[in-house]
Image (cartoon, rainbow, N blue to C red):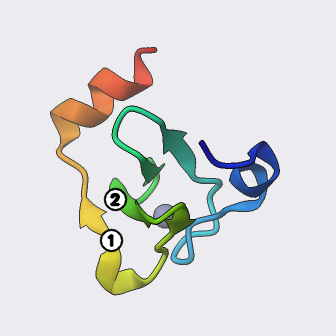
Amino acid sequence: MLPSDIMKILVCPVCKTHLIYNPHRNIFICKNCRIYYPVIDGIPDLRPEAATKLPSEESEKDSSH
Ligand SMILES: [Zn+2]
C-alpha cells in the first residue's frame, strides 16, 4: 500500500485530475482521460509513455464500488 498522503496529491499529468488508486491492480486511474498508470516498486509511474488506455467496461466496473 502507498501512503495516503501520496495518493491525495497525485494528479494526472495530462488533465490535472486527481488519480484514483486501485489496490487490486496496483494502478492509478484517471477517469477523465480513461487511462491508468502502473506502480513500479511502490512508485507510481506517471510518464505519458507508461499510461495505458482503460477499457470502458472495466472503468464502469471499478467506479461502481
Ligand atoms: Zn487525465
Mark 1 nearby-residue class (10 Å; few <14, some 14–19, many ≥20): some
Q: Residue at x 76, y 43 (%)?
A: 4
**Label 2 C-beta lies within 8 Å of the nearest ligand 1 atom:** yes
Position of residue 14 relative to residue 28, above or below, is below
Image coordinates for residue 6, horizontal then vertical, percent? 74, 57
For residue 25, side relative to residue 56 (left or right): right
User: Residue type at mark 1?
Assistant: Ala
In this figure, which residue is indicated by the disc labeled 1? 51
Alpha carbon of mark 2 to alpha carbon of mark 1: how far? 6 Å
Q: Nearer the viewer, residue 25 or 57?
A: 25
Q: Are marks 2 and 1 in contact (CB under 8 Å)?
A: yes
Q: Nearer the viewer, residue 15 or 40?
A: 40
Q: Residue at x 82, y 51 (%)?
A: 5
Q: Could you say whether the residue bearing mark 2 is in a helix, strand or loop?
A: strand
Q: Where's the N terminus, which quadrant?
A: top right
Q: Residue at x 74, y 48 (%)?
A: 3
